[in-house]
Amino acid sequence: MIDRGRLAAAYAAEQRRFEETHPASRALAERARASLLDGVPMHWMVKWAGGFPLFVREGEGAHFTDVDGQRYLDLCLGDTGAMTGHAPPVTVEAVTRQAARGFTFMLPAEDHLWVAEELGRRFGLRYWQFAMTATDANRFAIRLARMLTGRPKILVHNWCYHGTVDETFATLEGGVVRPRPGNLGPPVDPALTTRVVEFNDVAALERELAQGDVACVLCEPAMTNIGIIHPEPGYHDALRALTRKHGALLIIDETHTICAGPGGYTRAHGLAPDLLTIGKPIGGGVPCAVYGFSAEVGERLQGRIALAESDTGGIGGTLAGNAFALAAMRATLEHVLTEAAYARTIPLAERFQAGVEGVIREFRLPWIVKRLGCRAEYWFRPEPPRNGAEAAAATDLELDRYMHLFALNRGILLTPFHNMALIAPATTEADIDRHTAVFRESVASLVGR
């Protein structure tokens, strides 16, 4: 229903508008090309619509201001890293206080105990360790799973994303495991390290686990990084039963699905993983991550790493669990990512979904909206995808970039990867309704009404 010529012309007009209204960001982007690869500090930032990223001056709550003085509603929120909103006051106060006392010691403090006990209460796992990023947490969890099982391979879902973990950059092509597009310089063929199945495919899961060489299944409880894909009824029961049957450990990655509630999807749906990883939002934007173990796994790990090898086992990091990050985690978990916060943000995400669905109905578009907790997004397809392959096939990069840039030119930031909106506690109903109005305007511009 979208005329591609009209779409191209509309995008070109929006890009001109973006360049004209962001001269300071454009000047900094041009300057950045002399010292930053492709002019960005992390290469994925080339994906921002408009030809160059905004340069940010400051942020607070659900909004930020760029160097041109323009203020934005932030529905990207650091792709979950700032899910708490920018600079939550209680977290700012805690890290400010800790900064005066020291940043890192390579020694524990009482905050480590408080955070571990709180995580155990929320997620139901007994033992915890600290990392700097969810990528590290996933990597460490995989290494421990291999040690405990003596098995070489891991199993992931097709088109998953678990950070820059080499084993997870794999996909299926004609039923064969291949490097996923964009897998730069893989150390080995991922077919040597990884088995891949489609999400919600119980038969494939049984077949691959039956090979007897899988140390662990690493999965999001609902897929989010290729768009929101919900598990079908019974899938998690089958996943848990089959991993136990075939001796593989189950690792649940809650880094994005913490949007489902204070204890993530695990607590909301009563899951029972062997290990759990999470990073990004639990420090209010300060880099940090954790990985937890069930009592059974923790007891199996006790004493398995020799004292002489405890500092060279590939587990941990010099700055992992530093005092600055722990102060942020404690303040954020205690005062920001609370039951009360979700009681506010989830209804706002429902309002976002209802608003977008109303526009879709008005214009009779074959599009849908999916939601998970306080995260929602729209899809340019008539039916929900049930796995990563279906989701990837529905990707429309040109339409994505237009919708993102149209919103950006009107003061709303969405994620650069797909059409996801995340709701912070400081977001208001007026903010959500503003997005609905802008979304309607963008659709009308494409269908000629």
Image (cartoon, grey):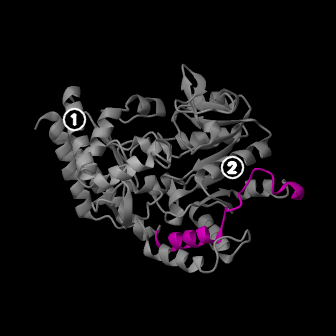
**Residue lying at 74% horizontally and 48% vertically, measured from the top left:** 144
The boundaries of the magenta stretch are 307-336
Q: Position of residue 159 (x, y in %)?
A: 51, 35
Counting the numbered discs, the total is 2
* Amino acid type, callout 1: Leu
Q: Position of residue 367 (x, y in %)?
A: 27, 36
- Answer with mark 2 or mark 1, whichever residue precedes in sequence: 2
Task: Return the residue at label 2.
Answer: 141
Dividing the picture into quarters, in which one does residue 65 lie? bottom left
Q: Mark 2 packing: few (<14 Cα in 10 Å), some, or many (20+)? A: many
Q: Mark 1 packing: few (<14 Cα in 10 Å), some, or many (20+)? A: some
* Residue 424 seen in the figure: no
- Label 1's element? loop
**Residue lying at 84% horizontally and 54% vertically, measured from the top left:** 305
**Which quadrant is the C terminus positioned in?**
top left
Dividing the picture into quarters, in which one does residue 6 lie? top left
Residue placed most toward the observer, 178 or 121? 178
Query: Badges 2 and 1: C-beta atoms under 8 Å apart?
Result: no
* Amino acid type, callout 2: Ala
**Residue lying at 46% horizontally and 60% vertically, measured from the top left:** 261
Apparent side of residue 65 relative to residue 279 in the rendered image (left or right) = left
Task: Return the residue at label 1.
Answer: 365
